[in-house]
Amino acid sequence: MNPLAATLGFDFGTESVRAVLVDLRGRELASAVAKYPHGQIVESLPGSAKKLPPHYALQHPLDWLDSAAKASCAALRQAKVKTDAIIGIGVAFTSCTMLPTKRDGTPLCLLKPFAAEPLAWPKLWKHHGAQSQADHINAVARQRDEGFLKRYGGIIGLEWFFPKMLETLEGAPRAFDAADVWLEAGDWLVWQLVGGPPESLPRSACQAGYKGMWSAADGYPSEDFLRAVNPKFARVVLDKMPGRLLAPGVAAGGLISAMAKKLGLREGIPVSAAIIDAHAGVPGAGAAESGTLVMVMGTSSCHMLNSEVERSVPGIAGVVKDGILPGFFGYETGQAAVGDAFDWLRKLTGRRDFAALGREAAALPPGAEGVMCVDWFNGCRTPLMDGSLRGAFTGLALHHHPAHLYRALLEASAFGLRWIVEMLRDGGVPVRKFVATGGLPHHNPLAVQVYADGLGENIIVHPSKQGPALGAAILGALAAGAFASPGDAIRAMATPKAGAAPVFKPNRAHRAAYDALYREYRRLGDWLSTKTGS
Amino acid sequence: MNPLAATLGFDFGTESVRAVLVDLRGRELASAVAKYPHGQIVESLPGSAKKLPPHYALQHPLDWLDSAAKASCAALRQAKVKTDAIIGIGVAFTSCTMLPTKRDGTPLCLLKPFAAEPLAWPKLWKHHGAQSQADHINAVARQRDEGFLKRYGGIIGLEWFFPKMLETLEGAPRAFDAADVWLEAGDWLVWQLVGGPPESLPRSACQAGYKGMWSAADGYPSEDFLRAVNPKFARVVLDKMPGRLLAPGVAAGGLISAMAKKLGLREGIPVSAAIIDAHAGVPGAGAAESGTLVMVMGTSSCHMLNSEVERSVPGIAGVVKDGILPGFFGYETGQAAVGDAFDWLRKLTGRRDFAALGREAAALPPGAEGVMCVDWFNGCRTPLMDGSLRGAFTGLALHHHPAHLYRALLEASAFGLRWIVEMLRDGGVPVRKFVATGGLPHHNPLAVQVYADGLGENIIVHPSKQGPALGAAILGALAAGAFASPGDAIRAMATPKAGAAPVFKPNRAHRAAYDALYREYRRLGDWLSTKTGS
């Protein structure tokens, strides 16, 4: 192994892209961030004063390329490595962020006739314009008892690929007709890097599997199903979704000359198929074996697991063969409000920061002296997959302070994860190890400790603060053939040095208390999620 | 009627006593307040460093007399009326505030051997040392199916007279044995004013009826019952509770010389039997007819009603013949946390005052954009009589601000009252009119408007800010024989002038919304109050 060889990992986020250069021993050589000039487009389209509908969140496709070039060149300058040393590229991207293009890859929104049509622009993952379309797709799928439902815990999300396509078909049929290709933004980015006709455009099995209702065994939803959804939708897969499905870590092709120049790299180096940003956190967190739950904790949380077994677990967001790494079944689950719920409570209680709140909450006993919380402040992702559910506090009395509510919220968040873990285990999917990554575990150790206590398990905090970018760099190394297996690549590039990863251990003395509190949490959750029917 | 004639009303509160001079046309001539030198005794007894147990709240009996004298003399100086013009005295007092004395009325705690015994001191209404005694009394009463239970909604409170006596019997048997007389502090005060042997000491039917398990028809609990509670308790009524039961407004006797001198009044003027402070708010609020619910709103709320009908309504705090005014059945109900819950939320959300919070909450639609609250932050008084119940917020989402919670809390408080009103009406007790009094309605008009909306009824805010003291003055006039009936006295002395009492009218457009919200409130309350059993 060439000790100087390194790979470039891109992490395309909601506001900016990060480029990180990592050598094959896992040393970070450089890291640079570039903001998207247009950021999130939520008020009005560029060059227009017309207000967008609420719940719209769009992006500008050229921002991705331009910012990636800026970040890549900055990282290369910083690292002072020879261009020759960079042997592969990996791409992590938000999802489902998606767009319509022409056959040559030109985004529809860049063409004059469609520049003023919001539904011709890339829709960001958090764009919530397709609620009615998601409802309709779910209703038809349930009525027809479609097999794909069981891979997604029984529900297709309003943020996913098909609802977003259908939204354009219904709301802007001219744009829908003019689109030759619909694809994930991460796939579009990789396609721009490696070129080629649409028939061979590299689609990630990760994005397709978790957000596009695709599976290796069954492919995309059937023409019959799509016709039942809308006759004009019947041939959308056949006519407008060309390409090859590839696992992340598999080479999508070599970097074309124009892009090599733009990014400051050598032509021809392998580019990995894309991966969803959160999912890149799995290799990025050093999770080389099956059975390790990687908790990517931030504003919301995504909890992912590679496993050798495929099980239909009710309530999970998705299980996808090769979805995260080749050779594994990748399970995705999530909690819709974590860091942003903590921040909401901080603001609600008029606190400037978490310092005193955390200190006071840490001093309280398990159960926050009677306060119980359910953490559905932005709906419940796993296992109920219901964005309309809401949070609650019970057990409140006049002697309770903000810290009581904060502690109860941390416990509720831990119990939300415990529910997910129990659900996986009850469904026959082993969960053996817990690794926390993302921004939150680094600046909120109390939350990690409460998670360890509430869960009754050790939690390792991975030291990397750029897990998804590191994960993307690992996929770049795999695409370059630098390692014999994903496990080898992860162990070499992302396993923390001894002592570098703090381990939070549960306080065994509180075990029974947390078991009882968890039962109470579940009972309150049961009532809140079913009361409208009673 | 002598246009110059006036009466003196005392309102003995938790921290101070107010004396108000009112002429027979209802004009307030003077008003003065005097603080109790010892205030609430909660840390340690006077002259001792020994810490009192938690939940203890005692008072010093001489504070009542000394402060009353100070307030009375100050009011008289202020009014510049001749002593001859004062024709009667009324006494409103917190309850159940009670004490043990010797036969001559000397409080036990003033005797050397008992000065250091906390359980020989007057126990303030809020003293919570008798929980286990209340539990035991309730258990025995339920087992024996005692008839008095149905007058109190099925539960005897831990703040009441018999649990507090039993607490001393169990905790300080020597003090219990040394006590010749147990009585309410209001009755003790009147006894001090009119003198006489213990056999004729004037006990208020109000205090005895609401807090002493007494009724005109059945008297006090039977010797058999008391023996079942504790053999040493069997003869407590016969041996230690001498006196005559009198309705408030009935003359207890004439002012004795020593007290006339102390208070600056004329010897021999009639003194009314005492009344509970909150209950004095009923005449004080101008409620001359049956069917008017007087809402005394403050830290907590007491909702009272005079009626011509006697009904056993499950859940009410008490129904007492002649309990508030002679000739009526007086119903008492209450909400345990009102103003203090509002204040708790204000502090919880880091707000300095209610100005912005109220403005923002007033701008929100009914239902606070999805937030639902149950207002049991200090337990539920009526109708569940369960101090262990706790408050809750549901429907919370990341876009909610403190004002959403505040509005939801105001609505919950209104629904708590609506539940009480529905319970009375369902039980056959007509409720025709609503009058709000106490401090809160004057400084929180938004709360009154939300009450009117949530209730779907007009609410009149009585202009007097000293309702209980005014009520006591009216009772003084009745005791003096200045009016032919309670109705005449109230109409003459407490009916607000035209336009002086603002009327809050419900917004009819929101009626259906509030009806639906109320059903949701009841459903959440049902769940919270029964979940431990499920």
Image: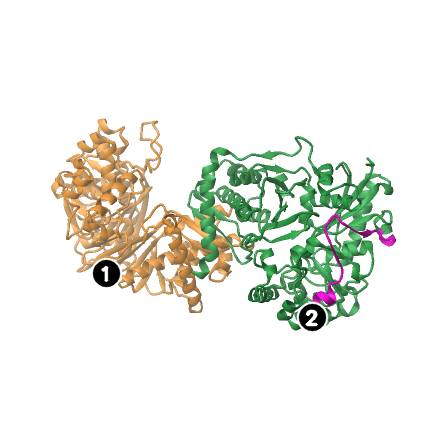
Chain colours: A orange, B green
Question: Which disc is residue A307 wearing?
Answer: 1
In the image, residue A26 sits, relative to residue B339, either above or below, namely below
In the image, residue B234 sits, relative to residue B340, either above or below, namely below
Instruction: In this rendered view, identify the residue nearer to me: B314 or B168.
Output: B314
The residue that label 2 is drawn on is: B172
Residue B497, given in percent of the width and then of the height, sits at 69, 32
Instruction: In this rendered view, identify the residue nearer to me: B189 or B485.
Output: B485
Question: Which disc is residue A41 wearing?
Answer: none
Residue A63 in view in this figure = yes
Residue A33 appears left or right of B262: left
**Is residue B243 magenta-colored?**
yes
The boundaries of the magenta stretch are B233-259
Res B109 → quadrant: bottom right
User: Where does the N terminus of chain A fall, quadrant-wise?
Assistant: bottom left
Residue B314, given in percent of the width and then of the height, sits at 55, 54
Task: Please give the chain letter of the residue carrying mark 2.
Answer: B
Residue A398 appears left or right of A213: right
Question: Type of residue at label 2?
Answer: Ala
Residue A264 in view in this figure = no
Residue B14, given in percent of the width and then of the height, sits at 69, 53
Residue B355, given in percent of the width and then of the height, sits at 57, 38
